[in-house]
Amino acid sequence: MSYTNYNHDFRRNKLAEPAQLTSYANLWTPTVDQKHMLGCVFETNQGDKYRYCKNGTTALAKAVLVASEAIDAQQVGQVQTAYGVSAGEVTFQILCTTGNGISNDELIDGYLLVNDGGATMGDSYVIRKNKWITSDTVMEVTIADAGGLRNAIAATDDVSYFKNRFLDVIVKPTTLTSPIVGATTTIVPASYYFWAKAYGVTAILTDVDGDVLVAGEPAGHDDTVGAEGTIGLAGTHAEDIVLGTAWFVSTDDECALINLDIPGI
């Protein structure tokens, strides 16, 4: 089994200099229409790394951290009563909780997870496409693995589904509701596609809130920081998330330069 059944509506392969981005979808020009797969990587010759994202419903300021959309509770843990699926199936139907807010093909490059059950528990799959069969209750899903389901999904199993983590991103809240995925390099209108920076020297707005950044010391998310999207001094791993090290520390409510290195991105 292998992922040979991906959705290829948009370019999927990683981009790296000297390959050039088109002028209408460069690193600093958000677009209203999609140009690449969500999560696509662009790397520069000096080692900077960007991820392709779609903004949510609120415009994003420049030089702020952004995070994945919070997971909707209605998309998690639905028992598949009467909707078991045989192993090997690539396209099949799942039972969903009403009010989940998902639209046709909104789960492209997202994930299907059997989060509770028997032999299938822990199986996860990349979603190729999705469409509704019955309102928002029965959904047809096609997975990217051309070999199909590795194990049969039983009617007693719990199934969850998740949008791509780079779809409908939000400004990083003061208390995290999802993983941080990057930083903006320009103003991003609502619902526009853009490149978020994930690695390298990056300008990010600071909110020291009494804990001053120190050159060479860890910088990151701190639940005590009072402003959304900002970065501060990272001290205790149990409370803070290290996102890199400070280089130019700046002052409160101004932009610092951070050697950004977002975990998992």
Image: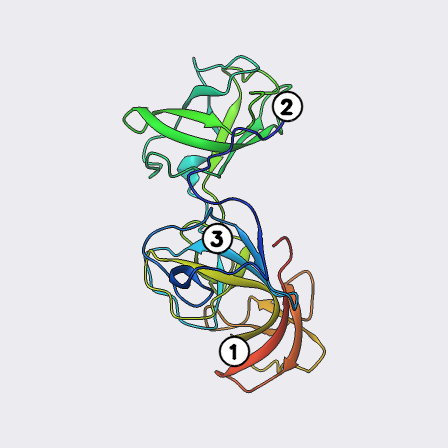
**Front of the two marks 2 and 1:** 2
Secondary element under disc 1, as helix, strand or loop, is loop
The location of residue 64, given as percent across then percent down, is: 47, 70
- Of residue 256 and residue 81, the one placed in the foreground of this image is 256
Q: CA distance from mark 3 to mark 1?
A: 21 Å
User: Residue 68, which numbered label?
Assistant: 3
Residue carrying label 1: 207
- Asked if residue 56 lies left or right of residue 13, the reply is left
**Residue at 35%, 57% in the rendered image:** 192
Which residue occupies the extreme right position in the image? 216
Residue carrying label 2: 1
Give the position of the N terminus as an image quadrant: top right
**Residue at 62%, 28% in the rendered image:** 2
Q: Quadrant of residue 246?
A: bottom right
Of the image marks 2 and 1, the number of the one nearer the N terminus: 2
Secondary element under disc 2, as helix, strand or loop, is loop
**Front of the two marks 3 and 2:** 2
Q: CA distance from mark 3 to mark 2?
A: 29 Å
Give the position of the C terminus as an image quadrant: bottom right
- Of residue 214 and residue 259, the one placed in the foreground of this image is 259
**Which amino acid is tagged 3?**
Ser
Q: CA distance from mark 2 to mark 1?
A: 48 Å
The location of residue 251, given as percent across then percent down, is: 55, 87
**Which amino acid is tagged 2?**
Met
**Residue at 48%, 55% in the rendered image:** 52
Vertical position of residue 204 compared to residue 3: above or below: below
